[in-house]
Amino acid sequence: MKGVLSVGFNLGNQRISVGLVITAAGILYGSFFISWGVRKLLMDEVLIKHRVEKGVRHSMTRLVNYVIIFIGFLLALSTLGFEVTKITIILSALGVGIGFGLQGVVNNFVSGLILLFERPVRVGDFIEISGKWARIARIGIRATTVQTMDQADLIIPNADLINSQVTNWTLSNRKIRITVPVGVAYGSDVLLVMETLRACAEANPMVSKTSVPQVLFLSFGESTLDFELRVWLKDADYRLKARSELNQEIDRRFREANIEIAFPQRDLHLRSVHESVGGVPHGMSFEKQDI
């Protein structure tokens, strides 16, 4: 066994043997194992007891993970006999190669560090990117995984989240405002319509009680009196469900109050009608409106 472990080759003045390679591999594996243990300890014990929010816990544990693995990598190289100065030279040479061929990878890596430190987006945040709503599921060192409302996982390079415009609906708080447009028929009681809309909002448990619902009479439409109900929700998770329940409640209460939800209507006027058409006196003509 001793003879097998001593088998190796010379790399300059340094002798690289099987035993050193096994030792370096063990150190590297140990660093992965230790980083996993420390990460789990911080996530499940330390940070959660101090009530650190979920996004911060993920960011801190991931940084600790990377630091421990990097230290293990340096220790593994030192075990093989590489000096720190030599490692610096190797890293400088790699930097030249990276500068030419791996610009995108480095850009995403640096962007990942920015995401972890500045935290413009966090795990669990709801964002809107390219017109789609999605929830941040995981922030990696190269790419970020987001989950759409259809439970589809999208892998987005970190550089896109840094360089592109991203709307974060839950960065400062999870409250969100939604608007529900409503059109009623001409002749409806405006005050009754506004009171009914406000009552629908106040009766919904997902609507925030700290912000008063707003009902606005916006305009006189072509076929409707246009109103808009604006409410603040307690959590962005309720966005679609709350809109659906508000629409159902508005429809129910409007039926009880005999308020008609209008639909587009057009009056058709004929310029002229053939004599063969019954019910139209001979020689009578009508104006026509284009529709």
Image (cartoon, rainbow, N blue to C red):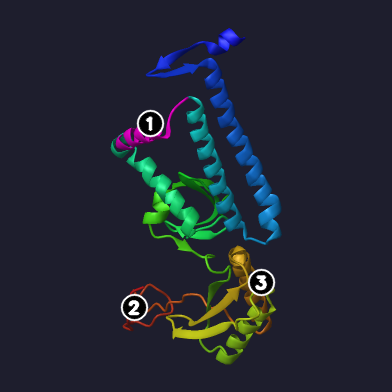
Amino acid bearing label 3: Met
For the residues labelled 2 and 1, the Cα–Cα distance comes to 87 Å
Where is residue 36? Give x, y as percent. Answer: 63, 40
For the residues labelled 3 and 2, the Cα–Cα distance comes to 47 Å
Say whether marks 3 and 1 touch (CB < 8 Å): no
Write down the region rendered in magenta: 81-96
Answer left or right for 204 relative to 284: right
Location of mark 2 (residue) = 289
The residue at the point 30 percent across, 39 percent down is: 99
Secondary element type, mark 1: helix
The residue at the point 59 percent across, 82 percent down is: 213
Secondary element type, mark 3: loop
Where is residue 66? Give x, y as percent. Answer: 52, 43
As displayed, is residue 136 above or below residue 175? above
The residue at the point 52 percent across, 39 percent down is: 71
- The N terminus appears in which quarter of the rendering? top right
Location of mark 1 (residue) = 86
Nearest to the observer: residue 185 or residue 122: 122
Please rate how many residues cluster around mark 1, counting C-alpha atoms within 10 Å: few if below 14, some from 14 to 19, many from 20: few
Reading the chain from its start, which is encountered first: label 2 or label 1?
A: 1
Where is residue 124? Give x, y as percent. Answer: 58, 57
Label placed on residue 206: 3
Q: Is residue 152 magenta?
A: no
Reading the chain from its start, which is encountered first: label 3 or label 2?
A: 3
Nearest to the observer: residue 110 or residue 11: 11
Please rate how many residues cluster around mark 2, counting C-alpha atoms within 10 Å: few if below 14, some from 14 to 19, many from 20: few
The residue at the point 55 percent across, 59 percent down is: 125
Amino acid bearing label 2: Gln
Answer left or right for 54 relative to 118: right
